[in-house]
Image: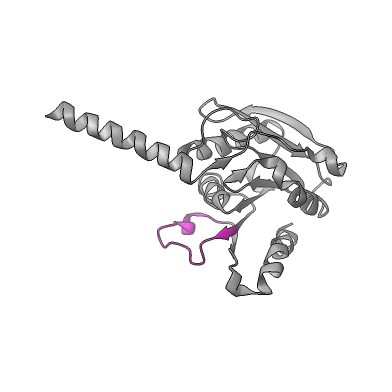
Amino acid sequence: CLLALLAILLTAMRVNATLEHHFIYFPDATQVATPSLYNLPFQDVIFPASDGTRLNGWLIPGQAGQPLVLFCMGNAGNMSHRLDNLLQLHRLGVSLFIFDYRGYGQSAGRASEEGTYADIRGALTWLDTQGWQAEQMIFFGRSLGAAVALQAALEKPPAGVILDGCRRRRPPEIPLVSYRGRVYFLPFPTASDGPAIERGRRFWQLIVVRLI
């Protein structure tokens, strides 16, 4: 009886992992371009997640004395689909680091919630070897990446956090009281917002300016 219950539990866990992968994460392995498309200088980086999974990222240098924006993307495509965002941010003078979660782009592994947390921990560890500490960074999380950025902020508080496309109301269980920096919530606009949608697409740039 105990063995039967254990078998059912393990099966349920496998089903849950499969559903999570197919209905939450939509990775694309094809890298369509690099920052060189916009003549941006960049370093193509291979680094390990905290559990050793091989990941790929781009480090784009900015002006001296400016912070680094750690960009946590949403759940679809890969980092090469965020080049327009990177260009807009780079124009503000900040340095940028974006990476593909496991299973996305050229990163190894299979996407999962705990995996994305291990991925950003690895990104922060690698950035530390390059002289970037969390307090010199702005964590930017869009959509699914908002949860990734928030988790990282609770573990290693940065200069500020921007959560873009997150829920309209922050769940009360998120313990932001333990985070000492500045947090900006940018709720995801809907069709009913009308002209506000276009304003929302640019508003996060203004927030970055406030933080730097």
Task: Name, please, the residue furthest toward the left.
Answer: 1
**Number of marks:** 0
- Coloration of the structure image: one colour
Observer able to see residue 155: yes
Nearest the viewer among 104 and 95 is 104
Q: Give the dominant element type of the magenta stretch: helix, strand or loop.
A: loop
Nearest the viewer among 19 and 207 is 19
Q: In the picture, which quadrant includes the C terminus? A: bottom right
Residue 149 image position (x, y, % from top left): 57, 48
Figure quadrant of residue 102: top right
**Residue at the image point whose x is 29% and y is 31% from the top:** 10
Q: In the picture, which quadrant includes the N terminus? A: top left
Q: Does the magenta stretch include residue 181?
A: no
Q: Is residue 174 magenta?
A: yes
Observer able to see residue 113: no
Residue 193 image position (x, y, % from top left): 61, 74
Residue 148 image position (x, y, % from top left): 54, 46
Residue 133 image position (x, y, % from top left): 66, 41
**Whether residue 20 is situated above or below residue 207 in the rendered picture:** above
**Whether residue 108 is situated above or below residue 59 in the rendered picture:** above
Residue 189 in the figure: left or right of residue 59: left
**Whether residue 201 is situated above or below residue 43 in the rendered picture:** below
**Residue at the image point whose x is 17% and y is 29% from the top:** 4
Nearest the viewer among 44 and 12 is 12
Residue 86 in the figure: left or right of residue 151: right
**Residue at the image point whose x is 51% and y is 47% from the top:** 151
Task: Name, please, the residue furthest toward the right.
Answer: 39
**Whether residue 156 is situated above or below residue 159 in the rendered picture:** above
**Residue at the image point whose x is 63% and y is 43% from the top:** 77
Q: What stretch is highlighted in magenta?
A: 164-180
